[in-house]
Image (cartoon, rainbow, N blue to C red):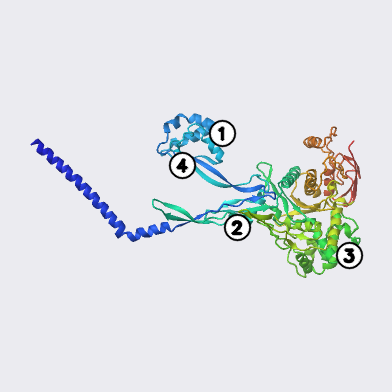
Amino acid sequence: MKKTNNRTHILLRYIFVMLGIALLAGAIAFKVVKTTVIDADKWNEKAEKYLSGVVTIAPERGNILAHDGSVLATNLRYYTVRIDYRSERFKMDQYIRQLDTIADSMAHYFPIKNRAQWLKHLKAPLERERLPRAYRLLRHISYADYMQLRKLPFFNIPNRNRNGIVLEPVDLRKKPYGAMARRSIGNVNEDSATGEFHGISGLEKALDSMLYGTPGISKKIALTRNIVDWADVKPVRGYDILTTIDIKMQDILENELNKVLELCDAEWGTAILMDVKTGDIKAISNLELNKRTGNYIEGMNRAVLGYEPGSVVKTLSMLIALEEGAVRDTSMYISTGSSYAFAGGRPITDAHGVSGMRASEVLEMSSNIGMTKITAIKYGNDPVGFRNRVAETGFFEPMHTGIAGETTPRYPILDDSRRSRIAMSRMCYGYTTEISPMSMLAVYNAIANNGKYVRPRLVKGLSRDGVDSILPVTYIRPTICSERNAKILQAMLKKVVWGKHGTGRMLRDKRVPIAGKTGTCYVIENGRYNTSKRRLAFCGFFPADNPMYSCAVLVCNPRKYPRGAASTSGTVLKNTALMMYSRGMLDNSSDYKASPVSDSPTSYATRQESQRKNVKSELGVKNMPRLATPAKTETGVPNVLGYGIVEALTLLEDAGYNVQISGSGYVKKQSPEGGTQLAEGSVVKLELSSD
């Protein structure tokens, strides 16, 4: 009886098992039929869609190179390291036991956090309800740093499934020279819509189509045992861009600009250095004050933005006067007087007023009246003709330097009205216009180049796959003026520095003679001129008798002395030229200290102790006198006894006086004395001594 019951139970179990198997088999059979027959069209459509899908392969972005092949911007592979705490065989017990040791090691080799911060960071995932799959440990580290990480406790476990390390590669755009010419080189950013990386500023933006390359196409291919990605069209790498930047000259220009900006506490400054013959931009710097840190950093690319230029534009007006025959004899005398109400407008005045001057002295003395009267000879009743003549030079045309954000000069549209005649008179000496430092520099460069109006350029060539293409030198116009008139203008610009009344005479130095023009204008705020803020410009070239390089400098709103165009912007140019000379960059081999001494006064007198120490160190002066702070004068001629030449010139010229200097050192005698009531434009004589 008992055996019969057991057999019955076994049969019942067998029946249930067989029934389950039959049901499962039936379900499988139904699913197979449903998938392959009933829903076949739907699945075939999905498979076809998946296999026919196209994935875009991003190309490798090209490099930006200096003129000698040095890398200015390139792509580098970095890695983000994460920990997968839910990895199948993650050694959680060992991880918890070694937390203190791990934190010590991380603080030593990756000091972005101290030991306590690393310990807190490593413990944080353990306090969550659900352990994370991809907890970030380190971001954007090099492969060498990653290999160092793999040597640390716990992370040195060979099996990643046990230490949880997940490595994510990422390509980043890097600039090996840091902030050097950063704005001109530019930046890249990811397009949120496409996920592609494109340039957003500077060369990266202007030349993005060539740097980016051509994307590739990847398709899904069904193999016997798997479906893989197949590059149907391979991506084409972007071009490497060979720029004209010279790293050594760039370093010199940036440092000299930074020194002057710090000295005069300016808001910002920009400087451009260009090769006269080719138009190659050898260096370009844009520095602005970081209010948070008090240092100067690479800022907005103001070198290609428009500003009222001030008196530096007089050179262009004089060029047109020479070309059109308004000035046939540079010895022609021009009566100026104290003011000139051209066309009945507000009287035009000069900062250094005299009764008259020769045409050859207008740029030297930076006379607004003289420039207006010369321009009026030809265009006094034809303001439209004046603007058209400027346009004929090619001055308004885009230069296509390769820098994103480049602007063209803006002159107001004129007609035959009295108002336009007055506007023209302001244009000829630098007001009511907007001109970028780059556009103004191109004119001075053309004069230095004997009239050949070469186009400034930042791109010299392209290369890819071993094939190099060198771009030819191009011209805005074959010539901007005749060679004869270019020589006349070169002589006029040299007298600005070397002439008796030159506004840039403090820039004299026989080692590298400079020619150029100073320019000053007030800053417009809320539609009106703010007479307490000025932009100071200097455009010129060097060496003056055999020009090799041209340079433009613009300094905005200096708040401490020096505050003159020559003592700020001009000094940047002069010091850049001297530094290049000292490094043998001007086809010279002379030692800096063995070179001829300067004809200008030695400007080492200063009241500031920190500056005295720097000057003593630089010049090797053993017994430099300590200067008492000179007494201030409320009215009349400023009292500059005891001042250095730079500070004395700035104070007196700002007050509207001309200065004659004899001797060298610091001011020992002044005539007339401080406080004397004297008309603006009068001469103040200074006797300097180093005793």
Residue farthest to the bottom, as pictured: 416
Q: Is residue 629 left or right of residue 261?
A: right
Q: Position of residue 524 (x, y in %)?
A: 72, 55
How far apart in space, not on screen, are marks 1 and 2 (Cα)? 41 Å
Residue at 60% x, 52% y: name it: 62
**Disc marking residue 209:** 2
Residue marked by disc 4: 134
Q: Position of residue 512 (x, y in %)?
A: 83, 47
Amino acid type for the residue under numbered disc 1: Tyr
For marks 1 and 3 on the same chain, the one whose residue lies earlier in the sequence: 1
Closer to the camera in the image, 6 or 652: 6
Which residue is disc 1 drawn over?
Answer: 109
Which of the two marks, 2 or 4, is nearer to us in this view?
Answer: 2
* Residue on which disc 3 sits: 328
Q: Is residue 56 left or right of residue 292?
A: left
Characterize the local packing of mark 2: few (<14), some (14-19) or many (20 or more) Cα atoms within 10 angstroms.
Answer: some
Disc with the residue nearer the chain's start (1 vs 2): 1
What's under tag 3, amino acid-wise? Arg
Q: Residues within 10 Å of mark 4 (few under 14, many from 20)?
A: some
